[in-house]
Amino acid sequence: MTKIKLCGLSRPADIEAANGLGPEYIGFVFWPKSRRYVPPEQAAGLKARLSPGIRAVGVFVDEAPETVAGLLQKGIIDLAQLHGSEDEAYLRRLRALTDRPVIRAFRVGTAADVAAAEASTADFVLLDSGAGTGTAFDWALLRNISRPYFLAGGLSPENVGDAVRALRPFAVDVSTGIETGGSKDQTKMAAFVAAVRKEDRP
């Protein structure tokens, strides 16, 4: 079954909607330059409202490993997603501080980018077109990838079914595609989840 991550949640209403839809993951953005940024205290309050079966992912861009590990150890997030220039040395530093799972994001533009993702020692890799651009990359580049991955970039209720059918990714990740006017849209959230689950039915 394809797992679902609804990213960039920032309001109690977003959490309530997610609890009703039952994605496997939700995401909090801890990058201050993002319009979806939530400070740790706000994220802690939202996590307290989250259903226990849904795992919270913290999205970071070149954050100090100590900060990332601290949020994991406090239980504000369950996994860390690295969306900047973090490399294998950074992963080693983070792993010395925490044993929680790590997702490393890769911007995919060429076959070499896919090869780099395959070689990563991160627990999971996320393949995207950019840093929250809301646009898709050429999915044909993923034809020969051998490891499970989160698919992101340009996904929406209208095209995620095609993505799941064609690629069978481990998980799909959406943020912009479930927004209206810069805020999460509960109708779009529900439509996105329904489109993925429809493809998973036998």
Image: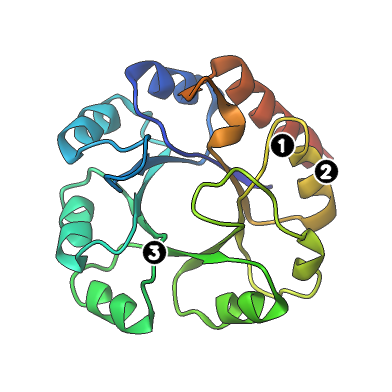
- Looking at the picture, how far across and down is residue 149, in whole percent? 61, 62
Instruction: Give the amino acid at mark 3.
Output: Gly
* Amino acid at the residue labelled 2: Asp
Q: Is residue 94 above or below residue 176?
A: below
* Number of dots carrying numbers: 3
> First in sequence: mark 1 or mark 3?
3
Between discs 2 and 1, the one toward the N terminus: 2
- Amino acid type at circle 1 is Val
Q: CA distance from mark 2 to mark 1?
A: 9 Å
Name the disc covering residue 162, or none: 2
- Residue occupying the point 38% across, 29% down: 51
* Vertical position of residue 82 compared to residue 164: above or below: below
Question: Which residue lies under the disc numbered 3?
Answer: 84
Circle on res. 196:
1
Q: Secondary structure at mark 1?
A: helix
Instruction: Give residue 68's quadrant in the image.
Output: bottom left
Does 124 appear above or below 8?
Answer: below
Residue at the spot x=65%, y=46% of the render? 135
